């Protein structure tokens, strides 16, 4: 979907073109760069679609599929990148290494099946494309001699069935976050899966990448909200039973979850939905050190209280977001329920945070009643109370990708790292990653800013999230990015953590993913891939290396 | 483990030989049969090991492995059956179709690796054996021309590492339930996974079969307690990282969970453990009909209150267990926490049950403080308060398999069916299965008793559990069992439910499992099996049909 009435999707960067930083905002950002990094940023790159070299498409589509296919240049460019730093930098500089040969928009699963059949017969690569928000090179055309089509599922965007008794809904794979919520809201229901990309990403994309969402505890990943999946593979249809739980062999759904388009195309899924929350309790808790805050998060995660929100921001992130002014780390804590008041849970949670030195001078805020129907354009403002540090943080969260794009235009390198590890190693891992990111970026760029937050918390561990910003100066930003990425990723895998908690593997994380996963599992996955996709049509080079 | 000091494991039936029904108890059971079914039961079969024909072993073990191997006849018989009705009936009648050729007891993962290498080279089938409590033909030697060894993991029974910060422990695959709890208790920790087989089943078995445990909501399966798994496959070692959560490709652990010994031998796992509960709240709620009780269970499962126990018994089960006297269905409801009092949760839960006509005349019972160290012999008595219907139910739960064995000796057919489906279909499915079980068994046996309970509850569905008892009369009990099993299983799969919620697939459920799972997934799983186990050594015929 490239337009929404008055708005247009950015062809080169994140989200809506209209929300990208204007000249004045870029000027302000430039001043911040001068102040913080002591360097003068580059003149902002001006996006220029005409500067992108779009080669002739290398394929001929049979008549039976022609109505679904376009070879429009701009459309092809839009489908040849995700939203990683590297994608934005290369798109802006007109150096996207490869452009897909065509974009296909199937109307239903039958179309997908016919397309995959043709791809297999004609020797064409097919890359499933949801919202294109991958930050790990998940949708970029690979270095493959075959022609490449991008399979955009945007026409499969309906909530086709709602089961209010089981609290479940059948949702098509190409439905965007807001589209899903808009269709569930009249039923008093919500999927309540809000990744940062929510406005621009799809159910199929979430399932294929095991996306992380709104909940800090319990159902942290889309996996946990999945009842059954329908997919089309080159070897036929894959439909699992709608089951609330099962012990019948390894879970079929769990083989598709995280398969990143390499095993099949997710056309629909029955998802567990929920009644819209009525009770909400929220608090902002300040800690003298990030480490003390971590102790509190651990306690909360092991308490069985199950906060919906439990996000720890280091002083830098807290200040940037406006959640806190000074040098404190801040815990954004929230409970929500459609069934019962949350005062007891919040009271106990604040006791636990106080045990770790947490201060909550404003006290908790409790609210009852559904919010007025939220506009699709205000995605995450429905996820908690709108007062205080929590709302401030959410605004920052949503605008961060636009800020990132502005920094890219100014020649800055911006990257995020997210991982998960067990509690016994969280402190040390964060220190190592911060040090590695900072040292590597400083060595290459002269200076760097590294900030940290905890996005999700489990009884046995947590998911740290690092942001690194550095001025590329005269260097190639992408080459600089590569070096920082490699250095930090090496440390993640060496520490036995995961190369990704919720950003997926894609092409960018593949070398580290291959070191992380058990070798026999890799062999089993490759065998499954060969069986399901004997011609190697689907997203080659993702998860299973092409040799 | 065939002995435990003074006690000895039954060679033909469930559990401890000493706890099998004695002559007096069998007499009493026989009177009950007369009263309930109007038939005179058979004279109790007398177990006779000498009546079992044990053929000469068909293999020669190399010197390097000889110390791990036994060809003792009784040992081989003990390893040639699980604990399904069919197993007990056939063992008692001396008609076990096949006896394993040897039993191997590795001391460590290296031994397992050497054994699998030898099996591949020598053309020997290997069946991983935990506690041998399979009720689905999971450990029986298959109809395969090759010699068969049973790989008993009993020597791998240690909790080797405890991580009190992350609340995790590394536990070897052959550790029995009580052994695990005994080793965790000094740390103030518990795995809190209590399947009915707990006393006699192992961690490796639980993982391989996706066992269902203590919790009625949230962590219903062992899957949810799993942090990482170590396995030996014929193609090498498989060790996943210790991760609290991850989005890096399809989960390796989820491929092993439910693999039933067909892909690898689970030698150890890092499991999520918990602080021992301090706060407990328990209530017994009666309903005028099972259907009203179901409505309450649904409400509870969708409330976000997360009861630890939420087991609904129909009037027959409630009466048998002593949880209630008359014609009421009974909900055994319990909350537990190591962190906080549960009065608010229980109060809200009782409001919800009252909305569905539930009566709790005795009110809830709240208790604080850890229980005195439970003896291993009293497994599930540590799972809640010891008063009222809950404790009565647990005693029945634990003695049920011995009762089953007594009924088998009297010529009765006893089978359980367990499944799961979404809430919109639970009522209808239960009615269909009850009707099918009752009609089929009555047609074949003249009369039958069918009872029902709900064992686990999810926001989107529930797990019904049926018990069928019928007198075989002059008929072959196993043939009768086969017909009832097939009729009910057909209905389960036709309804789109799962052929097993927590008993696994084994050989008994395979035909229905093959109908249930998505075909492309079956092909992918078969390809994974060929890759990991090219010689088809591991538990052939389970999950992946041998053609």
Image: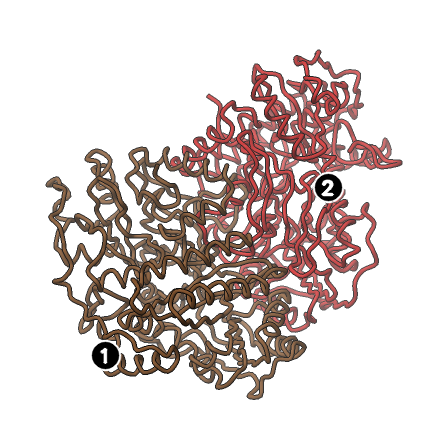
Chain colours: A brown, B red
Q: Quadrant of residue B61?
A: top right
Q: Nearer the viewer, residue B357 or A475?
A: A475
- Residue at the far bottom in the pictured view: A362
Q: Quadrant of residue B60?
A: top right
Residue B302 drawn at (x, y percent): 52, 63
Q: Residue at x 15, y 63 (%)?
A: A49
Q: CA distance from mark 1 to mark 2?
A: 65 Å
Q: Quadrant of residue A297?
A: bottom right
Secondary-structure class at tag 1: loop
Q: Is residue A132 visible?
A: yes
Secondary-structure class at tag 2: loop
Residue A420 drawn at (x, y percent): 52, 59
Residue B270 drawn at (x, y percent): 63, 49
| Residue under pointer 1 | A22
| Residue under pointer 2 | B176
Q: Residue at x 67, y 77 (%)?
A: A355
Q: Chain of mark 2?
A: B
Instruction: Describe residue B140's horizontal placement relative to residue B422 as left or right.
Output: right
Give the crowd class for mark 2: few <14, some 14-19, many >=20 residues within 10 Å.
many
- Up the image or down, A148 lies above or below A446; here it is above
Question: Do the residues under discs 1 and 2 have CB atoms within 8 angstroms?
Answer: no
Q: Chain of mark 1?
A: A
Give the crowd class for mark 1: few <14, some 14-19, many >=20 residues within 10 Å.
few
């Amino acid at each position: 979907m490239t337009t929404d009435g008055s708005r247009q999707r950015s062809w080169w960067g994140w989200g809506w073109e209209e929300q990208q930083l204007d000249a004045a905002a870029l000027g302000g950002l430039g001043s911040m760069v001068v102040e913080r990094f002591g360097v003068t940023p580059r003149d902002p790159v001006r996006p220029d679609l005409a500067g992108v070299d779009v080669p002739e498409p290398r394929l001929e589509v049979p008549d039976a599929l022609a109505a679904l296919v376009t070879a429009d240049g701009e459309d092809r460019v839009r489908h040849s990148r995700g939203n990683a730093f590297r994608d934005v930098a290369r798109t802006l500089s007109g150096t996207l290494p490869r452009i897909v040969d065509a974009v296909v928009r199937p109307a239903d699963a039958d179309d997908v099946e016919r397309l995959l059949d043709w791809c297999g017969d004609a020797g064409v690569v097919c890359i499933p494309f949801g919202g294109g928000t991958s930050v790990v090179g998940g949708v970029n055309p690979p270095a493959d001699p075959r022609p490449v089509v991008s399979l955009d599922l945007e026409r499969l965007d309906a909530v086709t069935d709602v089961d209010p008794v089981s609290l479940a809904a059948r949702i098509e794979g190409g439905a965007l976050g807001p589209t899903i919520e808009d269709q569930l809201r009249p039923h008093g229901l919500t999927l309540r899966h809000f990744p940062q990309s929510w406005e621009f990403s799809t159910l199929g994309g979430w399932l294929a990448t095991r996306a992380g969402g709104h909940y800090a505890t319990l159902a942290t990943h889309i996996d946990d909200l999945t009842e059954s999946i329908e997919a089309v593979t080159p070897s036929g249809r894959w439909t699992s039973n709608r089951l609330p739980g099962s012990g019948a062999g390894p879970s079929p759904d769990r083989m598709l979850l995280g398969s990143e388009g390499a095993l099949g195309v997710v056309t629909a899924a029955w998802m567990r939905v929920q009644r819209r929350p009525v009770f909400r309790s929220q608090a902002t808790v300040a800690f003298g050190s990030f480490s003390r805050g971590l102790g509190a998060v651990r306690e909360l995660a092991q308490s069985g209280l199950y906060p919906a929100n439990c996000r720890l921001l280091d002083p830098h992130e807290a200040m940037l977001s406006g959640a806190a002014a000074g040098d404190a780390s801040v815990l954004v804590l929230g409970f929500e329920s459609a069934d019962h008041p949350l005062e007891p849970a919040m009271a106990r949670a604040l006791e636990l945070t106080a045990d770790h030195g947490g201060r909550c001078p404003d006290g908790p805020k409790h609210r009852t009643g559904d919010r007025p129907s939220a506009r699709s354009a205000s995605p995450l403002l429905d996820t908690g109370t709108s007062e205080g540090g929590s709302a401030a943080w959410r605004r920052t969260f949503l605008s961060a990708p636009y800020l990132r794009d502005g920094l890219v235009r100014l020649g800055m390198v911006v990257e995020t790292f997210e991982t998960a590890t067990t509690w016994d190693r969280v402190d040390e891992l964060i220190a190592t990653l911060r040090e590695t990111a900072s040292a590597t970026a400083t060595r290459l760029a002269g200076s760097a800013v590294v900030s940290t937050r905890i996005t999700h918390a489990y009884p046995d561990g947590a998911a740290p999230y690092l942001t690194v910003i550095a001025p590329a100066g005269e260097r190639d930003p992408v080459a600089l990015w590569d070096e920082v990425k490699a250095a930090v990723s090496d440390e993640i895998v060496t520490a036995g953590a995961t190369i990704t908690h919720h950003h997926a593997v894609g092409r960018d994380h593949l070398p580290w993913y291959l070191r992380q996963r058990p070798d026999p599992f890799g062999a089993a996955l490759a065998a499954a891939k060969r069986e399901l996709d004997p011609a190697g049509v689907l997203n080659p080079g993702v998860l299973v290396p092409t040799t």
